[in-house]
Amino acid sequence: MTKILMVCLGNICRSPLAEGILKSKVFDFKVVIDSAGTGAYHEGKKPDKRSITIAKKNNIDITSQSARKFLVEDFDKFDIIYVMDNSNYENVVKLARNEEDKSKVKLILNEIFPNENLDVPDPYYGGSFGFKNVYDMLDEACEIIAKKLNAHGK
Ligand code: 4NP
């Protein structure tokens, strides 16, 4: 059973989409998927309406998710921590207690563009075009992640 955590800043725009998209692509008996934010401003809230809308257009329901903050214990609970951008990376790695924790943290777009360290842009202050763009990037990254997970015999 592989346990994956998707992390962004607010846990209301990007990481809820990443969680919903990846869940839609994997065999759930093989994988646990959750999401969190490095900031706590939106704790307990549902995803942003614009994320809900773009997910729904793609037949994915993310309305039951609620935002929570990333916690140090998440390093023990998850095998891979996918962050959306370099600032999330810094914020999460700052909390790592050792090299093993640190090695779990990966930029999600490196799945598509290895070693390029690209950001999934923060769409919060932009229009809905931003959300479509984010959705498409996450869909492509999650497709690659899902192929690996589904191929694993665990
Ligand atoms: P997210 O987007 O990190 O993709 O959930 C944001 C949501 C809220 C804020 C920033 C980014 N905010 O500053 O409140």
Image (cartoon, rainbow, N blue to C red):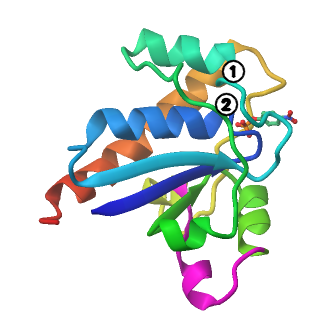
| 5 falls in the magenta region | no
What's the magenta region? 95-108
Residue visible at 33% across and 63% down?
Answer: 2
Tell me where residue 109 appears, x and y as whole percent: 53, 53
Query: First in sequence: mark 2 or mark 1?
Result: 2
Q: Is residue 14 above or below residue 29?
A: above
On screen, 22 above or below 130? below
The answer to whether residue 86 is left or right of residue 120 is right
Whole-Å distance between the Cαs marked 2 and 1? 6 Å
Secondary structure of the residue carrying tag 1 is loop
> What is the three-letter code of the residue carrying label 1?
Asp
Looking at the image, which residue is at 71% across and 64% down?
A: 89
Report x, y in % for residue 129. 66, 16
Q: Is the Cβ of the residue at disc 2 closer than 8 Å to that at disc 1? A: yes
Residue 31 at x, y percent in the picture:
30, 53
Q: Is residue 102 magenta?
A: yes
Looking at the rendering, the quadrant in which ligand 1 lies is: top right
Q: Is mark 2 within 8 Å of ligand 1?
A: yes
Asked whether 31 or 150 is in front, the reply is: 31
Point 12% across, 65% down: residue: 153
Task: Determine which quarter of the picture holds residue 43.
Answer: top right
Q: Which residue is mark 2?
A: 13
Q: Which mark is residue 48?
A: 1
Q: Quadrant of the C terminus?
A: bottom left
- Residue 22, picture quadrant: top left
Residue at mark 1: C-beta within 8 A of ligand 1: yes
Q: Secondary structure at mark 2?
A: loop
Q: Residues within 10 Å of mark 1 (few under 14, many from 20)?
A: some
